[in-house]
Amino acid sequence: MRFLSHHPLTLDGCRRGARMSLAAFPGFIVFSMAFGAAASQKGLTLGQVLGLSGFVYAGASQMVGLEIWQQVWSPSTILTIATVTAVINARLILLGVTVQPWLAREPKPLSAVMLFFLVEANWLYGTRYYQEGGRDLGVFIGSGLTLWLIWFLSTFMGYFAGALVPEPRRFGLDFVMPVFFCCLLVPLWKGPRRALPWLAAGVASYLTHVLVPGYAFIIAGALAGVVTGMILDE
Amino acid sequence: MSDVHSLAAGPWGAAITILIMGIITYLCRIGGVVLMSHIRLTPRAERGLRALPGSIIVATIAPVTVDTGLTAFVSLAVTVIVMALTRKELIGLAAGLGTLSLIRALGF
């Protein structure tokens, strides 16, 4: 398939990428099922839930999106969710920055398709493989496609599992999102100094929540965290 | 203008919202690659972006946690402790939700 791409793109590489992504399955399945369950509790239709998982495919923004989800939309609520999505997924820009050298000489349509599947997990496998000298694009595609499929299917299962629970509050399901986010926060811990932006984010978020109606608190908190991170460790 | 309002409020509102979220997310995915073919990110900007994931998490859950009160704090504390010990999301999730349902079953 050399004529399609600059670096090799083999079926073997795809298989290898799919195998690499196995390690991320538990996290993906749990997160995606939690999202599906939370979405069904929130009253989203199956089509909407699958649309979010299949097309947006970015867990944190999907979860936060549920917090802001409306039964009836208006231009201003759409603008809010669009801004929140952009702020949350701005971290994907960083991932793209680091894969740029790998994709620099690939045809643009191929890069465009591959980047749709870019998430932390396959970025991690891909960059590790690249640093070890591997150049087969199949690794990136295989892991990306596998993880997307798992994500999509798990949302589907979570949606029905969530709808089956009779008294969601009794099982704490109304609190799935905060609990799950706390689980995700733990591996990000790199010592108290690196957590200072989080503190700033929490304080700014709560103050904004008290003072300003709506969901501006997410953006205010995220920006406070970024600014603190920029000021910190010179 | 009223056309935009009625379109957003109509049956297609949710689909349009999902489409916009998807497009924005995709722009973030290709943004880094496109950007880097033109400029370099300063170390300062990179540090700021690195603080983003944790900040978003805390910013999202802080208001609902404070508003829910002590039960929320206790459940989240149990979640963090169990997660730190096991490093398995499923177990952390079960511990947090289990604690919350236990507290509620006890009538708090």
Image: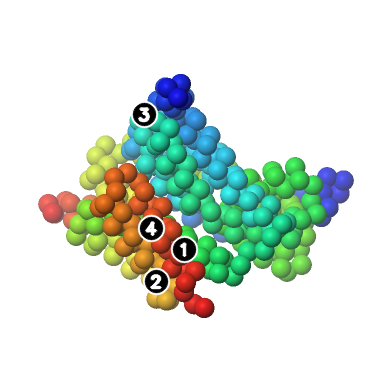
Instruction: Provide the chain ID for the residue under circle 1.
Output: A
Same chain under badges 4 and 1? The reply is yes
Q: CA distance from mark 2 to mark 3?
A: 38 Å
Q: CA distance from mark 1 to mark 3?
A: 32 Å
Q: Nearer the viewer, residue A215 or A42?
A: A215
Which residue lies at the image location 41% right of the left edge and 62% below the top edge? A224
Question: What residue sits right under mark 2 in the picture?
Answer: A196
Question: What residue sits right under mark 4 in the picture?
Answer: A221
Instruction: Provide the chain ID for the residue under circle 3.
Output: A
Q: CA distance from mark 3 to mark 4?
A: 26 Å
Task: Give the side of residue A111 with respect to residue B21, left or right.
Answer: right
**Which-is-in-front pick, marks 1 and 3?**
1
Q: SS of the residue at dot 1?
A: helix
Label 3: few (<14), some (14–19) or many (≥20) C-alpha neighbours in 10 Å: few
Which residue lies at the image location 41% right of the left edge and 70% below the top edge? A195
Which quarter of the image is occupied by the C terminus of chain B? Answer: bottom left
Q: SS of the residue at dot 3?
A: loop
